[in-house]
Image (tube, rainbow, N blue to C red):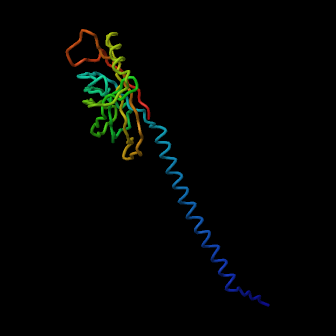
Amino acid sequence: MSQISITSPKHCAKKGGININNRHKKLFFTFSTFFTGLLLIIFLVWLILHPEKPEFSLTETDVYSLNISSSSTHLLNSSIQLTLFSKNPNKKVGIYYDKLLVYAAYRGQQITSEASLPPFYQSHEEINLLTAFLQGTALPVAQSFGYQIARDRSAGKVIIGLKMDGKLRWKIGTWVSGAYRFNVNCLAIVAFGLNMTTTPLASLQGTRCSTTI
């Protein structure tokens, strides 16, 4: 006697639903595996070619003016020119500098307005020369500014801080990272004696700058 099996439409729908769900799961598993592998490859490349931060060194600082307009208002007029080198120490990583703002400071006070440097690309182990002319007109300073400058002048030198704020991107092959903020801090020791009346006042020596990302 033959056995006849009758399957209801509802039962067939359940079987079809199981097949569809399995197909979706396989597709999801395939894509997730591919995406995970891609992220792992990018991470390994980043780990192997982990970029070193750029190096900056201040070679020359010339102070043309650093004068308080009046003792009552405490407003400063200044003009300073700086020259520095920027080096990319990486052998296989390039650097895009998208934004560069430079200004000078004295004892924690900003003594010039910000100057913007043009964006540029720095190739592997490349060194670039950067120059900026900084000016400040009627900048408010602390009441003690004149006394501090006079005391430094009697000591024969003044220490000026040069600061740079910017954004950079790493380039590894054809891949370019997102933007990272970075800060550069330099110190310039400028000869500033009582008998020095001619300008510009020049820095005594070059200095290595500190860079944070």
Which quadrant would the C terminus be assigned to in this image?
A: top left
Residue 156 in the image: state x and y as whole percent: 31, 10
Residue found at the very far left of the displayed protein? 198
Residue 63 in the image: state x and y as whole percent: 26, 21
Residue 187 in the image: state x and y as whole percent: 36, 22
- Locate residue 61: give its quadrant: top left
Is 198 left or right of 140, judged from the image as shown?
left
Viewer-side residue, 128 vs 212: 212
Residue found at the very far bottom of the displayed protein? 1
- Locate residue 118: give its quadrant: top left
* Residue visible at 38% across and 46% down in the picture: 176
**Up/down of 94 relative to 8, above or below:** above
Residue found at the very far right of the displayed protein? 1
* Residue visible at 52% across and 55% down in the picture: 34
* Residue visible at 77% across and 88% down in the picture: 3
Residue found at the very far front of the displayed protein? 72
Residue 139 in the image: state x and y as whole percent: 31, 31
Viewer-side residue, 38 vs 104: 104
* Residue visible at 28% across and 24% down in the picture: 70
Which quadrant would the N terminus be assigned to in this image?
A: bottom right
- Locate residue 94: give its quadrant: top left
**Up/down of 95 relative to 144, above or below:** below
Viewer-side residue, 64 vs 175: 64
- The number of discs equals 0
